[in-house]
Image: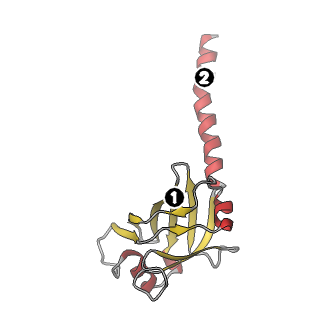
Amino acid sequence: MKKLIHIAMLCIPLIAFSQQKNVIEKNTVSSELIFGKYTDCLRPGGICTFNTSTTKAQANTQVTYNKENTITLIIDRSKITKEEEYKIVGQYLTTTSKVKELTFIMEEDLTLEAETKSGLKTANHLTKIAKGNYPVAITKDTFTITLILE
């Protein structure tokens, strides 16, 4: 009988973690981001516009709201130009580049649109992406950036 109770107790964390994964998946939206660093965009650097896309075909980024009051951007490199890559990481990358991580600079806070907040299911008090320097993880197919929400 004790073994049966112990087995049941060991299964509780497994069930809890499987439920948590479903919640995270629901907080992801497809978006089309335009980056403003080194452009004539009105914003001096970072993300220029943040549009929640209605179709995945026009989206260049998957945005996920994390429980730590952050969002993670996974930017599809096949859907952006070399110029846009330059605006994100501040240098041109080639197939021979050995760089695994660079810095993305948000020079100003960026207020999230209501549609984006709703799609991500963020907490009501989190209204903007905080300015700051953020590491960019680079793979052959993606850039991954985790930004802080305030």
Helix, strand or loop at label 2? It is helix
Residue ranking furthest to the bottom: 40
Is the Cβ of the residue at disc 1 closer than 8 Å to that at disc 2?
no
Relative depth, front residue between 27 and 42: 42
Q: Is residue 62 above or below residue 150?
A: below
Q: Which quadrant of the structure image shows residue 45?
A: bottom left
Report the Cα–Cα distance between label 1 and label 2: 36 Å
Q: Position of residue 81 (x, y in %)?
A: 47, 85
Q: Tell which circle, 1 or 2, labels the residue nearer the N-terminal end.
A: 2
**Which label sits in the foreground, 1 or 2?**
1
Residue receiving disc 1: 149
Looking at the image, residue 97 sits to the left or right of residue 49; the answer is left
Q: Position of residue 134 (x, y in %)?
A: 39, 64
Numbered label tally: 2
Relative depth, front residue between 148 and 13: 148
Relative depth, front residue between 30 and 45: 45
Residue receiving disc 2: 9
Other residues around mark 1 within 10 Å, as few (<14) / some (14–19) / many (≥20): many
Give amino acid for label 1.
Answer: Leu
Relative depth, front residue between 114 and 60: 114
Q: Position of residue 54 (x, y in %)?
A: 70, 73
